[in-house]
Image (cartoon, coloured by chain):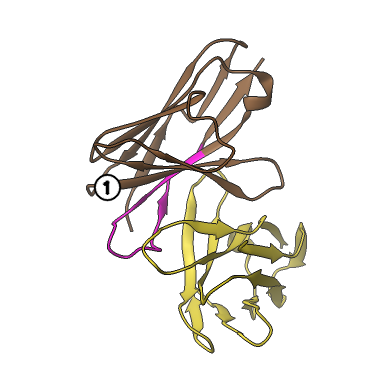
Amino acid sequence: GDSVTQMEGPVTLSEEAFLTINCTYTATGYPSLFWYVQYPGEGLQLLLKATKADDKGSNKGFEATYRKETTSFHLEKGSVQVSDSAVYFCALHLSGGYQKVTFGTGTKLQVIP
Amino acid sequence: GAVVSQHPSWVICKSGTSVKIECRSLDFQATTMFWYRQFPKQSLMLMATSNEGSKATYEQGVEKDKFLINHASLTLSTLTVTSAHPEDSSFYICSVTPGLASYEQYFGPGTRLTVT
């Protein structure tokens, strides 16, 4: 079945450090890929998405490129801030009408001043 | 994006009792809502898809008689955990979708259920 694997956390970085959170997927078709972010005490929010191979999603300084050859969608940010501290979820969705989204386990990011 | 609320944000109940969790779409009408369960350090597990005016669609392995879902209006879906047991303790999250954009989901803040 479809699945998403992302690196275990927590990830602790100093402010202005470079961030990479790895995400790989397994899917029977051609999924759309997403990163969601969950700030403390809040619901999940869509951070960025990519709907086809080689697409790059970007938002708030975060980027992720849909790599079909490596079935990956790694999240990157060049310079993290304390306000980026949150849990990040990689997810996929297969088109075809059924709206089920498959999530990874989430990676907690803690940025220290 | 859409604003989704859940009530209560946390609840403690005794084993054997039932608990109702509400999910409200505050700024648009949602024909479809989703209910997820999240265990510590684990992914969100889709429990069921809630369709307004019809029966919910449950994922494999989810007991429909234990987790009762009612989507009586376009802005409200409820999840009732019946005869709760300690193993039902978890974080329950709902989401809504505008429908046409099939992958766009907007999530509520979640409800922490603890069964003693």
Query: Is B60 displayed left or right of A19 in the figure?
Result: left
Instruction: Give residue B66's position: percent from left, percent from top.
Output: 52, 23
- Please report the bounds of the magenta region as a residue range: B93-110
Query: Is A95 displayed left or right of A74 in the figure?
Result: left
Query: Quick one: A95 or B92, which is closer to the camera?
Result: A95
Q: Which chain is brown?
A: B
For the stretch drawn in magenta, what is the main secondary structure? Answer: loop
Q: Which chain is yellow?
A: A
Q: Is residue A56 above or below residue B85?
A: below
**Quadrant of the rendered image containing residue A73:** bottom right
Q: Residue at 48% of width from left, 19% of height from top?
A: B19
Query: Is A109 displayed left or right of B28 in the figure?
Result: right
Query: Quick one: A108 or A5, which is closer to the camera?
Result: A5
Q: Is residue B52 above or below residue A74?
A: above
Location of mark 1 (residue): B30
Crowdedness near tag 1: few (<14), some (14–19) or many (≥20) residues, C-alpha within 10 Å: many
Q: Residue at 76% of width from left, 58% of height from top?
A: A9
Chain letter for mark 1, please: B
Q: How many marks?
A: 1
Q: Is residue B8 above or below residue A10?
A: above
Query: Is B19 displayed left or right of B115 in the figure?
Result: left
Question: In the picture, which quadrant includes the C terminus of chain A?
Answer: bottom right
Q: Tell whether position A25 is magenta.
A: no
The local secondary structure at tag 1 comes to: loop
Residue type (three-letter) at the residue carrying disc 1: Ala
Q: Is residue B71 visible to the viewer in this orientation of the structure?
A: yes
